[in-house]
Amino acid sequence: MKHCDACTVDFTGDMARCPLCQNELRGEASPAAFPAQQIYLRPRRLAVEIITFVTGAILLLHGFFSYLFSWPIPIASASAAALIISVLFINSAILHVPRPLRLMFRYFYIMLAIALVWFVATMNHVVTMFVIPITCLVSLVFDVVLLIVLRAKAIDEYAKYLAFDIVAGLLPLTFIPLGWAPWDVLVMVSGLVSLLVLLGLLVFARRQLFSEFGKQFSA
């Protein structure tokens, strides 16, 4: 075990200097209490590097073929942005390994971000009339199932995600006055389901919900 004469502290592991005072340690190294984190991070970082390289190569080919075949700039830009957003999400999931349910919540947000990028680039109302409302509805149904199965635990651990899904489900209503949803049935359904989920939370779990948000903001 290594020993620091200045701090009079013993350390496991093969360290050359004291992490507290940087004084040179003396003694024989002994196994650390925890395995080296690098052992676990190295494969993940390698995977991220490989994915990043492949993505860069795809983007270069994408730009080459876009120029060669004169693809419309909005379409080419939206495709590239969607690929970048997806890869950033995948890399983050590989490095940080969030819980599967958190991964599902975030996946819905990535889908919404890609849909919004595609709409801005193409101004195709199919995105605002179908893709975005359907994505919001699927996420809200996922929330309801989660609340039924996990009950109070769902609010304790995923309150901010539930709130974000409700807000996201209401936002498509803004497409109607903007003229982005000529057929507004799914947009209206998305807003209605969001309000129903909000009403259910306020009626059946109001105290727990407010308490959880109080913790979030106080932290």
Image (cartoon, rainbow, N blue to C red):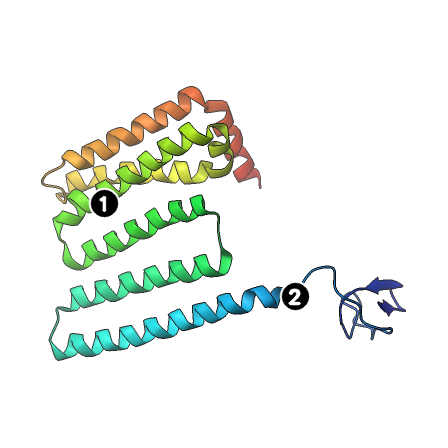
Residue 201 tag number: none
Q: Nearer the viewer, residue 20 or 11?
A: 11
Q: Nearer the viewer, residue 17 or 149?
A: 149
| Local secondary structure at mark 2 | loop
**Around disc 1, counting alpha carbons within 10 Å, would you say few (fewer than 14), some (14 to 19), or many (20 or more)?**
many
Specify the quadrant that holds the N terminus: bottom right
Q: How many marks?
A: 2
Please state the horizontal and vertical placement of residue 35, each as a whole percent of the image. 67, 63
**Around disc 2, counting alpha carbons within 10 Å, would you say few (fewer than 14), some (14 to 19), or many (20 or more)?**
few
| Local secondary structure at mark 1 | helix
- Position of residue 98 relative to residue 147, above or below, is below
Q: Who's the residue at 57% across and 38% down the image?
A: 218
Please state the horizontal and vertical placement of residue 123, each as a whole percent of the image. 14, 54
Outermost residue toward the left in this view: 182
Please state the horizontal and vertical placement of residue 97, each as a whole percent of the image. 49, 55
Residue 36 tag number: 2
Task: Please state if 120 lies on the left or on the right of 162 as rendered.
Answer: left
Q: Who's the residue at 74% across and 59% down the image?
A: 33
Marks 1 and 2, how far apart in space?
A: 44 Å
Task: Please state if 190 lies on the left or on the right of 199 as rendered.
Answer: left
Of the numbered discs 1 and 2, the one sitting upstream in the chain is 2
For badge 1, the amino acid type reads Ile
Q: Who's the residue at 35% across and 50% down the image?
A: 107
**Can you tell which of label 1 and label 2 is closer to the viewer?**
2
Q: Nearer the viewer, residue 99 or 59?
A: 99
**Residue identified by numbered label 1:** 132
Task: Please state if 46 lies on the left or on the right of 2 as rendered.
Answer: left
Dividing the picture into quadrants, the one containing residue 132 is top left
- Position of residue 154 relative to residue 20, above or below, is above
For badge 2, the amino acid type reads Ala
Please state the horizontal and vertical placement of residue 212, each as a whole percent of the image. 52, 33
Q: Who's the residue at 22% across and 62% down the image?
A: 78
